[in-house]
C-alpha cells in the first residue's frame, strides 16, 4: 500500500528527484566523508513534507517512538544498523538498558518499546526495560494488544552507575526526551554509555539551533547538486520569549511572521507557485504545550492571542520558532499524508506515512486522530532504479526521502557537537 503521489508526474519535484538520482555516487561519497568527521545521532526520525515543488524536513526527533510502525521486512535493516551502532560505541557490549518515557501507559508507546527491545535482542544483546518513573516501584508486566507483554522494572542508582536488580548494563538507551528536565539519577554515570547524550534532550535542545545547522548542510548539498537549497530547506525565524495569553513578545512575533511570509512570497513568485504561503508557529524547545499553529496572515496572530487569553489555563512563556510552512501534496485514500523516515546510526532503516483524514495540506498531522501506514521499504531506499522516469518509481522517491532524512540527521550531529558541554574548546 503506497500512497498515490499526487506529485507523481508533474513539476520541480521531479527535476529535483532526477538531479538527486543522477548525483547518487557524489551524494553517497559526500555523506561518507561527513561521517568520517562527525558522529551521527544514535537513532532519529525525521518528518518530511513533499509540497510538489520542494521537499523539506519539518521536525527531527532524537528520541524516536513509533518503532512499532516498522514492518517485519524492515527489521533486518534495523538490526544490522543496531549492530553497527553498538559495535562502534561499545564492541564488548553485553547488556543494554532501555529507559522509556515516564508515565508510559499507552499500549501504542509500549509496543514501540517492545519493538526496540526486539531489535537490540536480535542484534545480540541482553535487553531489559528500566523505568526512572517514581511511580514504578516494582517489576510491572503490561499486556499489549498483539498478545505480547512488556516488563518495566525500577531503575536502581548505585554510587556511579545505574541498572536494575541483577542487571548491570554497559549501555543505556534513552527513549525519553527529557522534556521535564534532566533527572539526577542519569547524571555523572561512570563507565556507562548513555545514548543519546543528556544534551540531546529538550532541556538543552532548541529547534532553531537544529534548523540553523540544517540550513548550513542544505546549502552544501544544494551546491553539490547544482540546485537552489530552498528546494530542500524550510526557512525560519526565531523569537525570544512569547506568551500569547499575556500578550508578551507579540511585536517580535508579528514582525518575524511578516518578514518570513514576505520571503516565502518572493520564492513562490520566483518559481511561479500559486499556493498561498503560510508559516508554522511552535515552541523552540519542543516541550511546551502550546501546540503547533498554522498562520497564513499576520492578522491571524491577534485572533490567536485572543483565544489564548480567553482560556483559563495560561501556557508559560517560551522561545518561539517561526518556520516556513511546507504543505503536503501526498495522499492515502484521500487523507493527507507525510513520510516519516527512521534512521539508526547513519542508515535509513525504514519509515511510514503519517496520515490524518481531518487535517488540511497546510496543517500539522502529528495530532490526535492520525494513523500510520508503512512505507514500502521492502524495496530498499538504498536501491534506487536508475533510468526510470521521475515520479514513476517508488524506490526512487523513497531514496530522495532518505537523502533529506539523512541530511537532517547530519544537521543533528552538528547541533549535538555545538551544544556538547564536554567538548574541548579551542581558542
Image: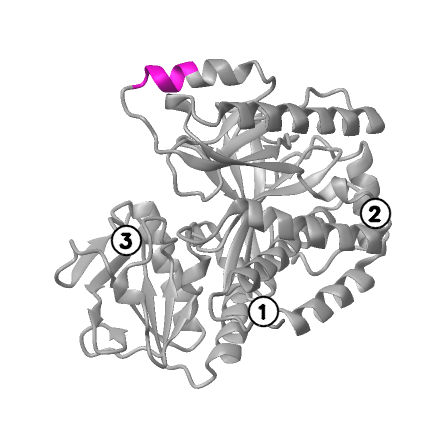
Q: Which residues are magenta?
A: 306-311
**Residue at the (22%, 56%) spot, across then down:** 133
Which-is-in-front pick, marks 3 and 2? 2
Q: Residue at x 66, y 42 (%)?
A: 56
Label 1 crowd bin: few (<14), some (14–19), many (20+), radius 10 Å: some
Residue 386, image x and y in percent?
Answer: 83, 55
**Seen in the image, is 74 located left or right of residue 189?**
right
Residue 130's image quarter?
bottom left
Q: Is residue 143 left or right of residue 177?
A: left
For residue 354, say whether it is visible: yes
2 vs 1, front mark: 1
Q: Position of residue 206 (x, y in %)?
A: 50, 48
Q: Position of residue 414 (x, y in %)?
A: 61, 60
Residue that mark 1 sits on: 39
* Magenta segment includes 16: no
Q: As drawn, which residue projects farthest toward the bottom?
A: 92
> Looking at this view, is 426 or 51 the one in front?
426
Q: Tag on residue 18?
A: 2
Note whether 253 is above or below 386 in the view shown.
above
Q: Is the C-beta separation of discs 3 and 2 under 8 Å?
A: no
Q: Earlier in the sequence, mark 1 or mark 3?
A: 1
Which quarter of the image is occupied by the N terminus? top right
Relative to residue 349, is residue 277 drawn left or right? right
Q: Residue at x 31, y 77 (%)?
A: 169
- The quadrant in which residue 338 appears is top right
Dot 2 lies on which element?
Answer: helix
Local SS, label 1: loop
Pointer 3 or 2: first along the chain: 2
According to the image, label 3 marks what residue? 147
Amino acid at each position: 500500500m503506497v500512497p498515490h503521489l499526487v506529485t507523481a508526474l508533474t513539476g520541480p519535484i521531479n527535476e529535483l528527484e532526477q538531479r538527486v538520482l543522477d548525483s547518487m555516487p557524489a551524494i553517497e561519497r559526500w555523506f561518507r566523508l561527513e561521517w568520517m568527521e562527525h558522529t551521527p545521532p544514535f537513532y532519529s526520525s525525521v518528518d518530511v513534507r513533499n509540497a510538489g515543488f520542494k521537499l523539506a524536513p519539518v521536525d527531527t526527533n532524537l528520541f524516536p517512538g513509533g518503532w512499532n510502525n516498522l514492518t517485519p521486512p524492515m527489521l533486518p535493516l534495523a538490526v544490522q544498523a543496531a549492530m553497527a551502532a553498538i559495535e562502534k560505541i561499545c564492541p564488548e557490549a553485553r547488556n543494554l538498558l532501555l529507559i522509556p518515557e515516564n508515565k508510559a501507559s499507552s499500549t501504542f508507546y509500549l509496543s514501540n518499546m517492545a519493538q526496540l527491545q526486539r531489535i537490540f535482542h536480535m542484534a545480540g544483546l541482553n535487553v531489559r526495560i528500566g523505568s526512572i518513573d517514581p511511580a514504578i516501584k516494582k517489576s510491572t508486566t503490561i499486556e499489549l494488544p498483539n498478545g505480547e507483554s512488556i516488563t518495566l522494572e525500577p531503575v536502581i542508582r548505585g554510587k556511579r552507575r545505574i541498572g536494575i536488580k541483577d542487571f548491570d548494563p554497559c549501555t543505556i538507551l534513552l527513549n525519553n526526551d527529557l522534556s521535564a528536565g534532566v533527572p539526577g539519577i542519569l547524571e555523572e554515570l561512570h563507565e556507562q554509555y548513555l545514548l543519546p547524550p543528556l544534551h540531546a534532550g529538550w532541556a538543552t535542545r532548541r529547534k532553531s539551533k537544529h534548523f540553523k545547522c540544517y540550513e548550513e548542510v542544505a546549502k552544501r548539498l544544494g551546491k553539490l547538486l547544482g540546485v537552489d537549497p530552498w528546494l530542500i530547506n524550510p526557512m525560519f525565524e526565531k523569537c525570544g520569549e512569547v506568551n500569547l495569553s499575556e500578550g508578551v513578545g507579540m511585536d517580535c512575533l508579528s514582525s518575524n511572521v511578516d518578514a518570513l511570509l514576505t520571503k516565502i512570497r518572493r520564492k513562490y513568485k520566483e518559481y511561479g507557485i500559486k499556493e498561498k504561503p503560510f508559516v508554522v508557529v511552535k515552541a523552540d524547545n519542543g516541550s511546551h504545550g502550546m501546540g503547533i499553529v498554522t498562520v497564513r496572515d499576520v492578522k491571524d496572530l491577534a485572533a490567536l492571542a485572543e483565544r489564548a487569553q480567553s482560556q483559563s489555563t495560561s501556557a508559560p512563556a517560551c522561545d518561539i520558532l517561526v518556520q516556513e510552512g511546507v504543505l503536503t501534496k501526498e495522499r492515502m485514500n484521500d487523507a493527507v499524508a507525510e513520510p516519516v523516515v527512521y534512521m539508526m546510526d547513519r542508515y535509513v532503516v525504514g519509515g511510514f506515512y503519517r496520515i490524518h483524514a481531518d487535517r488540511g495540506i497546510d496543517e500539522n498531522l502529528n495530532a490526535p486522530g492520525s494513523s500510520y501506514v508503512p512505507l514500502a521499504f521492502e524495496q530498499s531506499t538504498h536501491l534506487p532504479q536508475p533510468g526510470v522516469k521521475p515520479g514513476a518509481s517508488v524506490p526512487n522517491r523513497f531514496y530522495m526521502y532518505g537523502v533529506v532524512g539523512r541530511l537532517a540527521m547530519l544537521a543533528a550531529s552538528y547541533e549535538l557537537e555545538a551544544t556538547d558541554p564536554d567538548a574541548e574548546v579551542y581558542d
